[in-house]
Amino acid sequence: MTADLLPLRERKKLKTRAALVDTALALFTERGFDQVTLDELCAEVEISKRTFFRNFASKEEVASAPLEALWTALLGDVEHAPLGGRPVLEVLQEAMLAAVRRMSAEGPEWVARVRLSQELSQRTPSIAAHGLQFCDRTSAAFETTLRTRLGLGDRDQRPRLALDLLVAAFHAALRGWTTGSPEPTLDGLLAELRTVFAAVPEAVTFTGDGPGRRVSRA
Amino acid sequence: MTADLLPLRERKKLKTRAALVDTALALFTERGFDQVTLDELCAEVEISKRTFFRNFASKEEVASAPLEALWTALLGDVEHAPLGGRPVLEVLQEAMLAAVRRMSAEGPEWVARVRLSQELSQRTPSIAAHGLQFCDRTSAAFETTLRTRLGLGDRDQRPRLALDLLVAAFHAALRGWTTGSPEPTLDGLLAELRTVFAAVPEAVTFTGDGPGRRVSRA
DNA sequence: CTCCAAAGTGCCACTGAGTGGCATAAGCCT
DNA sequence: AGGCTTATGCCACTCAGTGGCACTTTGGAG
């Protein structure tokens, strides 16, 4: 399909990149992130360490590649999506659902890869740190786009807050997905996303007296 | 006050720790985070590299120490604060304001240190990554506390979303503070925090009507 | 005052991530 | 096929971070 539209060189590059991601996820999952050296990984894929660093900027990046791909895709989508008179956050949330569907439509392995990436991120602080920083950078870029498209001032904090809320909701959904369902299914992820999105407005307002006016003791 | 209550050993340790933070902030600010090697820093403080790693877990940690101290203090505060029938987010926000005031009351240098820490974090990705991951871990710990104190279920996403919203607002305030006012004053930071907190509810609902029917906004 | 146990520190050697430089091989274009 | 571009391999290097062991300092006991 999309195979021979690209020059041979690009296809090879993509292939080694994919191989790198898959074997990295496998090795890291099996033996733990820092029990696997880059030399091992490179030997497995039959690539030199120098070549690894032409594909990924760090050891952490290869582990969070699937999740980063999703964010990049989302960003591209919203770049040109119509954001008429509806709440911005709502538009962002729908774009996220659409992006997830689109990613997993391009190949059923994607969902499994995201699951592995997320599980690794949860048990490996340095991967988590890298992922969070990526989200932060992406959100910052996004914020600028939103501001200019909506004609908002530089001091208006709302677009960035909305973006951060989207990120927080997405991460919450990922956590719920991995701890809740043993099988990594697309529908499970989508359901989790919708649940969390629905809980967002309450997060601002909820007063925390449990059912039946529970009073907290000091 | 609290000086000679501690044994001599502890005081020494605290002293080298403080010296490490201050000279690190100075050197990093002056020449850039990765233009300064740990050997240099250690030579400056007249300490061995081995000793450095008994005080801080990483090179990034010494740079984000002031901000991390704030978060830790905040966490301790809210651990025992009364959170009666008011909105949880509001309680968290007030606790944050109180924590900031309390930190800066213990020494006027704290505000300046936080400013340097924040500026470094903005221009150095690896520091930013470390800081974000620290916030994430802290929020996770916090979330558990909130859940048990409020008697909420494991699947209730609202406390974590509220926490992430607090983090997002705090970071937005820090950015506004550093870009807005040239002088790092406590009042400037507090004002910025209040502004951002006020913008939070709108972040969920605002509709960003394009440049036709634009609502007046500061 | 002295001696002892414990804790902190310095020194040294080592692993492993990440980088720069240069020669080589592979894909591309005419 | 020819040269041109671009990726790759290899090598040596820096520096963050760790483990081990010997040494000093502190706090406490006789």
Image: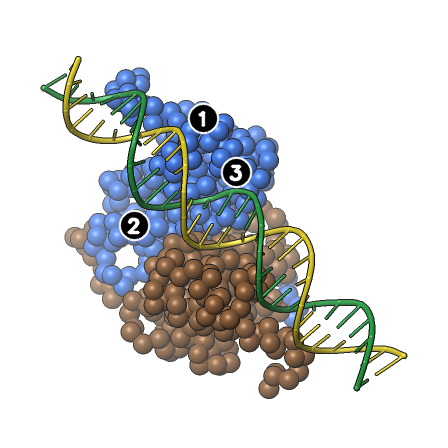
Chain colours: A blue, B brown, C green, D yellow
Disc 1 + disc 2, Cβ < 8 Å: no
Amino acid type at circle 2 is: Ala
Disc 1 + disc 3, Cβ < 8 Å: no
| Residue A67 image point, x, y percent | 43, 39
Query: Which dot marks residue A204?
Result: none
Observer-side mark, 2 or 3, equals 3
Crowd band around label 1 with a 10 angstrom C-alpha radius: few (<14), some (14–19), many (20+): few
Q: Give the residue at mark 2.
A: A141
Chain label for disc 3:
A
Amino acid type at circle 3 is: Thr
Q: Give the residue at mark 1.
A: A46
Quadrant the N terminus of chain B occupies: bottom right
The mark nearer the N terminus, 1 or 2, is: 1
Helix, strand or loop at label 3? It is: loop
Q: Relative to C13, does residue B40 appear above or below in the rendering?
A: below
Observer-side mark, 1 or 2, equals 1
Query: Which dot marks residue A37?
Result: 3
